[in-house]
Structure formats: C-alpha cells, structure tokens
C-alpha cells in the first residue's frame, strides 16, 4: 500500500497526521521531523529507502496537518509519549515488529528522550536509532547563556504558563548552502514561521535533561551533524558523542549546514551515503 494517509487519535484526543509507505518489508523506519516543519519535508526517506523498508512518517502535534496549538507544547514529554503511541499504532495496524527510529533536529531530541526515558520493558525496542543534528545545545550567546545557567532556571522557564509566538526562531539562511531551500520553506503553507516561547523553553529544558547523561541505547546508534551547523551547536554535539554517549557511530559532514538532506550535492551525497550505510546493513 503506497502513500496511505491515516489519522491517529492520541490519548488526549489530539489527532496526528500519519503517512505510511508499506510494501510488506520486514523492517519499518519511523521518522520524527524537526521544529516548525512537517513530515513532507523528509520525502527523501521514501526515495532512499521505500524499495527496502516500510516507512511511517507523521506530523508532530501543533505542526503540519496534525492538530494542536500551532508551534506550542504544554510539556515536551508529550512528544515522546506521542512517538510511543505512533510505534504502538504501527504494531497494531501493520504488525510492525522491527523498527528503526530516525529523528531530525528537535525530532532527534524527541527520539533520544524516548529511548532514554520512555521505553518500557514490554515495549518494542528499535533495532537502530539515527539522530540527525540533535540540539544538544543551541549555538551562540543565547545558547551559552541558557546552558551555563543553573538547571533550575531552564526548568523554571519551561514551567511558565505565559507564552508568546516568536518569529524567526529558525534561521532559514542556515538550513542549507542552497538558498532555494530557505525560500521554499517560506512558501510551504505547512511550515510554521512563528513558534511559541513555551516550546523553545520546553525544548531547552528537555535537551539539558537528556544530553547531560548517556542515552544507553541497547541497539546500534548513529548520529550526523554538519560541522558548520548554525542552528544547533556542532561542537557541543561532537563533545557529547565523544565524551558522554560514546556508543555512537558519529559522522561529521565537514562544511555542512543543518539540513544535510537539503544541502548542495557534495554535502548531501556524503550524508546520504552515511545514512544508507547505517540502515542497509540490518537487511543482511
């Protein structure tokens, strides 16, 4: 069944948009997209892998075609619990019993938090986890200020009820060296041009909670980042996977920006080769 669209009704009645490419393959890839975007921006996963894997993609709550307050989350853990329900949905409806979890940017943080904190003893465990540009730390002065402050401060900011939508939280100029990528992002009606301050503080708090200790993933773990990423801090990310969570196959694409899948050819092909090498060996 190709390109089937489903609606998943979550525990709190929120409806998630789900897209499935199913070909009776033995393994499922479940992808989680980044902040402000939607699963349609990761259609390359179908181009690369639909011949070999079943693929399930979904829009996060408050994003894309899913329901929920736009660009907002009450508690970041809701995202991990949503991923848990997505996996249960794949098991129940499609009989999925082998899964690969892939997350990009904030989706990588959600994926990391899920495998670190939310997999129960009776839950289906992934056979691989791939994290693309996870936000271990925000770059620049703001990132340094927030991540060097006491943890109680970021936790307190995340608990604030007051929230306002803020434009320009994602620097579109630094998605890719291809300027057309940023322009296409602005034209895409399913992308969010404003994100709530509550979501930002929840993400920062979750990042500090997750990436100050090992993930302790019980399956092969892969990660990738562009060395010139300006949306997440590549130095902090590299340090984490070299000094804290050492059980990771980390690929640093020299010169690449944040969206390696949307990069100019030399960066994109290097990333795709690593992505394919990370996934394909589980077929044999």
Image (cartoon, rainbow, N blue to C red):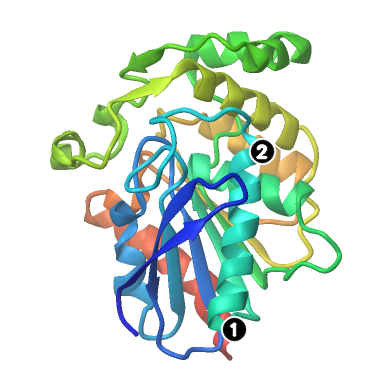
The CA distance from mark 2 to mark 1 is 26 Å
What residue is shown at x 36% (from left), y 85% (from top)? 51
| Crowding at mark 2 (Cα within 10 Å: few <14, some 14-19, many 20+) | some
Residue 119 pos. (x, y %): 77, 57
Q: Where residue 77 is drawn, which disc sits there?
A: 2
| Crowding at mark 1 (Cα within 10 Å: few <14, some 14-19, many 20+) | few
Q: Quadrant of residue 57?
A: bottom left
Residue 74 pos. (x, y %): 58, 27
Residue nearest the observer in this picture, 12 or 116: 12
Q: Which residue position holds label 1? A: 95
Residue nearest the observer in this picture, 121 or 16: 16
What residue is shown at x 59% (from left), y 50% (from top)? 82
Q: Quadrant of residue 89?
A: bottom right
Position of residue 47 relative to residue 265, above or below, is below
What residue is shown at x 54% (from left), y 47% (from top)? 13
- Count the marks: how many? 2
N-terminal label among 2 and 1: 2
The quadrant of the rendering that contains the N terminus is bottom left
Position of residue 78 relative to residue 71, above or below, is below
Residue 16 pos. (x, y %): 45, 52
Is label 1 in a helix, a strand or a loop?
A: loop
Residue nearest the observer in this picture, 60 or 32: 60
Could you tell whether 142 is left or right of 111 in the image? left
The quadrant of the rendering that contains the C terminus is bottom right
Is label 2 in a helix, a strand or a loop?
A: helix
What residue is shown at x 42% (from left), y 11% (from top)? 164
Residue 269 pos. (x, y %): 31, 62
For the question of whether residue 50 can be seen, the reply is yes
Could you tell whether 279 is left or right of 196 in the image? right
**Residue furthest toward the front?**
13
């Amino acid at each position: 069944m190709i390109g089937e669209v489903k609606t998943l009704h979550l525990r709190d009645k929120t409806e998630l948009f789900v897209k499935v490419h199913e070909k009776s393959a033995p393994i499922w890839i479940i992808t989680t997209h980044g902040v402000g975007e939607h699963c349609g921006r990761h259609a390359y996963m179908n181009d690369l892998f639909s011949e070999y894997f079943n693929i399930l993609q979904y829009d996060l709550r408050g994003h894309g075609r899913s329901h929920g307050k736009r660009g907002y989350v009450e508690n970041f853990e809701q995202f991990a619990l949503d991923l848990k329900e997505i996996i249960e949905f794949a098991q129940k409806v499609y009989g999925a019993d082998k899964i690969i979890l892939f997350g990009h940017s904030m989706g990588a943080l959600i994926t990391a938090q899920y495998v670190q904190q939310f997999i129960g003893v009776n839950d289906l465990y992934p056979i691989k986890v791939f994290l693309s540009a996870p936000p271990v730390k925000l770059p620049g002065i703001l990132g340094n200020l927030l991540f060097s402050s006491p943890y109680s401060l970021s936790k307190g900011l995340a608990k604030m009820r007051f929230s306002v939508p803020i434009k320009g939280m994602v620097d579109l100029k630094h998605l890719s060296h291809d300027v057309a990528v940023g322009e296409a992002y602005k034209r895409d009606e399913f992308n969010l041009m404003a994100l709530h301050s509550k979501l930002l503080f929840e993400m920062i708090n979750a990042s500090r909670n997750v990436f100050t200790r090992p993930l302790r993933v019980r399956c092969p773990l892969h990660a990738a980042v562009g060395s010139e990423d300006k949306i997440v801090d590549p130095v902090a990310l590299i340090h984490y996977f070299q000094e804290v969570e050492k059980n990771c196959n980390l690929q640093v694409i020299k010169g690449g920006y944040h969206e390696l899948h949307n990069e100019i050819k030399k960066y994109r092909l290097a990333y795709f080769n690593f992505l394919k090498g990370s996934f394909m060996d589980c077929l044999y």
